[in-house]
Image (cartoon, rainbow, N blue to C red):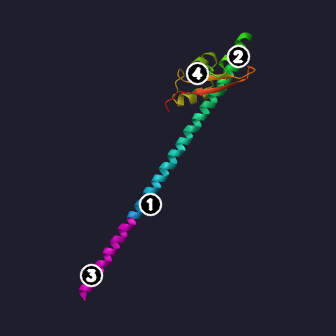
């Protein structure tokens, strides 16, 4: 009789240990999944932040480039040169950012964003595509950045 009680007690203890181990395993898996989801969420948030910063940088460069084109480049063209803009409608007129900076200073915010992204002003380019009628505001701008991130 005593042996049966001991056997039942041992079986109950083994069952309890198995349940405890199962509980620990499930708990570990749940914690792992939570950590994995947090990591994915945080990395996506960081990626989105970098994309927003990159977009802000491009918008800043576009505004800077438009200012350059309208106030420095176009106003210096002769009538004959304005007519020649048609030749650049498809291929564009390319300037490096360093070329633009020598003629027109970049805003402090633009410089900060540019430096934060570790961009190379010699290799980063702005391409102006003149549009027909070739007036001062008739152009599109494309930015090609050379940055470390």
Asked whether 17 falls inside the magenta stretch, the response is yes
Part of the protein shown in magenta: 1-24
Q: How far across and how far down the image is residue 63, in percent?
A: 66, 27
- Please rate how many residues cluster around mark 3, counting C-alpha atoms within 10 Å: few if below 14, some from 14 to 19, many from 20: few
Which element type, helix, strand or loop, lies under badge 2?
helix
Judge whether 142 appears above or below 30 on screen: above
Q: Is residue 24 visible?
A: yes
How far separated are the C-alphas under marks 2 and 3? 97 Å
Which residue is tagged 4? 97
Which residue is tagged 3? 7
How far separated are the C-alphas under marks 1 and 3? 34 Å
How far separated are the C-alphas under marks 1 and 2? 63 Å
Q: Are marks 1 and 3 in contact (CB under 8 Å)?
A: no
24 vs 137, left or right, is left
Front position among marks 1 and 2: 2
82 vs 56, left or right, is right
Q: Taken as a whole, is the magenta stretch helix, strand or loop?
A: helix
Which element type, helix, strand or loop, lies under badge 1?
helix
Which residue is tagged 1? 30
Q: Is residue 78 visible?
A: no
Front position among marks 2 and 3: 2
Which residue is tagged 2? 74
Image quadrant in which you'd find residue 144: top right
């Amino acid at each position: 009789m005593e042996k049966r009680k001991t056997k039942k007690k041992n079986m109950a203890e083994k069952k309890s240990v198995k349940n405890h181990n199962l509980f620990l395993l499930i708990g570990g898996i749940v914690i792992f999944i939570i950590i994995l989801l947090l990591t994915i969420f945080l990395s996506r948030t960081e990626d989105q932040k970098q994309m927003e910063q990159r977009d802000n940088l491009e918008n800043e460069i576009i505004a800077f480039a438009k200012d350059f084109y309208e106030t420095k480049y176009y106003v210096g063209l002769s009538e004959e040169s304005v007519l020649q803009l048609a030749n650049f409608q498809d291929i564009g007129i390319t300037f490096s950012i360093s070329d633009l900076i020598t003629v027109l200073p970049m805003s402090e915010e633009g410089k900060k964003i540019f430096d934060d992204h570790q961009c190379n002003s010699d290799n980063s380019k702005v391409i102006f595509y003149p549009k027909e009628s070739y007036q001062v505001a008739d152009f599109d701008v494309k930015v090609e950045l050379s940055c470390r991130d």
